[in-house]
Amino acid sequence: MGDPKKKRKKFDKPKKMWDKAAVEERRILAERYGLKNKKEIWRAETVLRKKRQNARKLLALPLERRIKREKELLDSLSKLGIMPRKPTLDDVLGLNIEALLERRLQTLVWRKGLSNTVKQARQLIVHGHISVNGKRVTAPGYIVTKEEEHSIDYFTPSIRNKVKTRPVKRERKKAESTEAKQGAEKSNEGRKTETETKKAVEKTEAKTEQSKEKLEEKKETGKEEKEEKGKEGEKAEKVQSKKTNGTGKGKKESTEEVK
């Protein structure tokens, strides 16, 4: 078993560490859920991977052996609130990482309005200001069950006055302003992409025209060379014919003299 005091690795690193799309997705998840580093994402991915592996193994078993173990797996997921009331093994295979990240204590503290931001929720938990079932919990990655969800509250009531929750109107205004900025940035990016595509199309058209002109020039030069070669061949044939005619006459004269 080993020494229980030693910390063990609770996650597996992805096979493609520097895949651009995967890195971008993990970055967005880390910003959305206020995660400290990518290890927290890898830990959630390993948990889901193991659950999917168990579901695949159960699907391969016969019905008699599968029923009991299938119920245990589905009940464990439904208790955590990751799955609906009547889940199936197909639902387990279609699980996303967001379903597990939504059950973290940090996100639930923020969803319940006990903090203004996700990062503030993490700070409150680490500093020991949040309790679950009347007990202090200092782990932001603690997975909250459905039964414990209603019991999330401040550990000390005095901290409620210190945490100043922002009014809803300000939050809405800020959200609208951020959305407007994002929309303007997207429109500018769209315009830039349109101009870039137009320039690229024009460059390609110019290159095609140049290539066509070069091909036509090559064809014309090839025709001229062929004509010149044909003329030179005709001249050479005439010269050879004259030479042959001259040699034939000389031979005839020599034979007549001998006679």
Image (cartoon, rainbow, N blue to C red):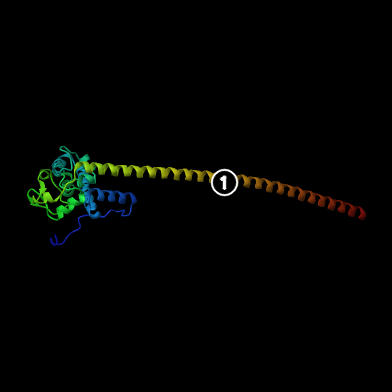
- Of all residues, the one furthest to the left in this rendering is 134
The percent position of residue 259, horizontal first and vertical second, equals: 92, 53
The percent position of residue 176, horizontal first and vertical second, equals: 27, 41
- Give the vertical position of 186 relative to 138 (above or below): above
- 204 vs 160, left or right, is right
- 177 vs 206, left or right, is left
Q: Exactly how many numbered labels are in the figure?
A: 1
Q: Is residue 181 visible?
A: yes
The percent position of residue 73, horizontal first and vertical second, equals: 15, 44
| Mark 1 neighbour class, 10 Å CA radius: few under 14, some 14 to 19, many 20 or more | few
Tell me the quarter of the picture where residue 4 sits. Answer: bottom left
Nearest the viewer among 57 and 168 is 168
Nearest the viewer among 246 and 256 is 246
The percent position of residue 136, horizontal first and vertical second, equals: 9, 53
Nearest the viewer among 55 and 136 is 136
Classify mark 1: helix, strand or loop.
helix
Nearest the viewer among 139 and 79 is 139
> Which amino acid type is shown beneath numbered disc 1?
Gln
Tell me the quarter of the picture where residue 193 sits. Answer: top left
- 234 vs 58, left or right, is right
- 59 vs 184, left or right, is left
Q: Is residue 259 visible?
A: no
Residue at the image position 50 percent from the left and 44 percent from the top:
202
Quadrant for the N terminus, please: bottom left
Identify the residue under disc 1: 210
